[in-house]
Image: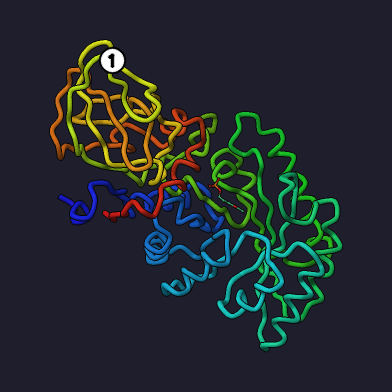
């Protein structure tokens, strides 16, 4: 039995070995390109500090996160690798980025000037990746206005431009027309460097979809997120790299009963049986990030058998119909794993595997194996 079972009979089991194997598989697939593991959103639910530490010891050259706060947590945990923060930089955050030695995304001349001044004030050089918007319309300078930014970026003495990047909106689709168009726009922006006889900084655009489906997008660096955790970004995507899921979600039966016909189960009475059935209770709910949308739709595995969730998922518990099956209090219940993938849960809940993973609350203890 697991030590955390003493606290609550529910936990997430994370295989750091599987994450390292996925990292190795990605490296082998991308050849000479460098790999920046993406550990934002608590490493897609797997635990940011543990995953980052393991990947650093495994030889990862750098890390990517979304927020300044995530990068600071990593620094405080002793992660010394270069870290790129993908999100936009607020002016008041700049001194913190510099103090923690983090790489910033910059997409305007004005921001570069602010970064330059803040770096000069502490007599250091700030490291920046220029962010180009090639069709996502999220952040970044538009590809058709990028040249002025690239030109200006050469003139700030306290800013070291170490990278230039863009982000795909549709690289996990079956139809890659728009992803190819984004890549073409990015390559056109990058022409700036050879035209001036300059060595370009590190060029990167590929997320998991790009890594799997567009080898020509690998460039100098790739940024795998979801595939690092052994999950494909979509059902359509070509599975050109073999991956191992790194996360199992486990609980236990805490209550067993027979429910009589005409006795509806859970809030709102949305399900009842027309014959006596065996129903068990599992102590996990939407307060743990197990979607309420799984009510009367999700399945779990008990004693090697799939069984359906009946009635509404509550904040802390849900019920499972065994029909005539057997289970005892304390039996293991698998919510994810044992043949149930993050994609299955996403399909039942009407969402994507990204949301299933990142939604698992910190209330659920993580156990590393
Ligand atoms: C989240 C993110 C990634 C990783 O995306 P996946 O689809 O999970 O591989 C890469 N780059 C940026 C800028 C991101 O925000």
| Quarter of the image where one finds residue 369 | bottom left
Where residue 260 sits: x, y (%)? 22, 17
**Residue 79 pos. (x, y %):** 44, 71
Looking at the image, what colour scheme do you see? rainbow
Residue 358 location (% of width, % of height):
46, 48
Is 65 situated above or below 285?
Answer: below
Please indicate, yes or no, whether residue 17 appears anywhere in the rendered image. Answer: no
Q: Secondary structure at mark 1?
A: loop
> Which residue is drawn at the image coordinates 82% and 57% (left, top)?
146
Identify the residue position indicated by label 1 in the image: 262
Quarter of the view holding residue 312:
top left
Q: Nearer the viewer, residue 101 or 1?
A: 1
Percent x, y of residue 225: 51, 50
The relative height of residue 318 versus residue 206 in the rendered view (above or below) is: above
- Mark 1, other Cα within 10 Å: few <14 / some 14–19 / many ≥20: few
- Depth order, front residue of 43/182: 43
* Residue 18 appearing in the image: yes
Q: Given the current orientation, which residue lies at the most extreme top position?
A: 274
Q: Is residue 137 left or right of residue 346?
A: right
- Residue drawn 71% across and 45% down? 136
Q: Which residue is rendered at x = 28% and y = 34% of the image?
A: 338
Question: As drawn, is 66 to the left or to the right of 325?
Answer: right
Q: Closest to the observer: 274 or 205?
A: 274
């Amino acid at each position: 039995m697991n030590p955390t079972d003493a606290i609550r009979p529910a936990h997430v089991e994370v295989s750091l070995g599987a994450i390292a194997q996925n990292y190795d598989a990605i490296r082998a697939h991308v050849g000479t390109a460098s790999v920046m593991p993406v550990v934002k959103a608590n490493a897609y639910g797997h635990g940011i500090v543990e995953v980052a530490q393991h990947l650093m010891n495994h030889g990862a050259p750098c890390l990517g996160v979304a927020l300044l706060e995530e990068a600071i947590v990593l620094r405080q945990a002793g992660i010394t690798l270069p870290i790129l923060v993908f999100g936009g930089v607020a002016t008041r955050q700049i001194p913190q980025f510099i103090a923690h030695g983090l790489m910033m995304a910059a997409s305007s001349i004005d921001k570069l000037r602010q970064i330059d001044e803040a770096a000069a004030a502490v007599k250091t050089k700030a490291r920046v990746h220029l962010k180009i918007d090639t069709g996502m319309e999220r952040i970044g300078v538009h590809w058709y206005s990028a040249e002025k930014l690239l030109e200006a970026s050469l003139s700030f003495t306290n800013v070291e431009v170490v990278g230039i990047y863009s982000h795909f909106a549709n690289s996990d689709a079956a139809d890659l027309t728009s992803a190819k168009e984004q890549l073409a726009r990015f390559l056109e922006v990058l022409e700036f460097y050879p035209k001036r006889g300059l060595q370009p900084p590190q060029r990167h655009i590929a997320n998991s979809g790009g890594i799997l489906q567009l080898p020509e997008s690998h460039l100098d660096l790739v940024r795998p997120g979801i595939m690092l955790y052994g999950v494909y970004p979509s059902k359509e995507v070509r599975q050109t790299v073999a991956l191992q899921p790194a996360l199992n979600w486990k609980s236990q039966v805490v209550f067993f009963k027979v429910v009589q016909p005409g006795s509806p189960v859970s809030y709102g009475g949305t399900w009842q049986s027309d014959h006596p059935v065996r129903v068990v209770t599992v102590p996990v709910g939407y307060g743990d990030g197990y979607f309420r949308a799984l009510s009367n739709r999700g399945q779990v595995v008990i004693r090697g058998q799939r069984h359906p969730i009946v009635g509404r998922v509550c904040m802390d518990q849900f019920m499972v119909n065994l029909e005539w099956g057997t289970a005892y209090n304390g039996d293991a219940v698998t919510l994810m794993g044992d043949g149930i993938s993050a994609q299955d849960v996403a399909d039942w809940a009407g969402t994507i595997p990204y949301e299933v993973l990142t939604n698992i609350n910190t209330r659920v203890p993580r156990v590393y194996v």
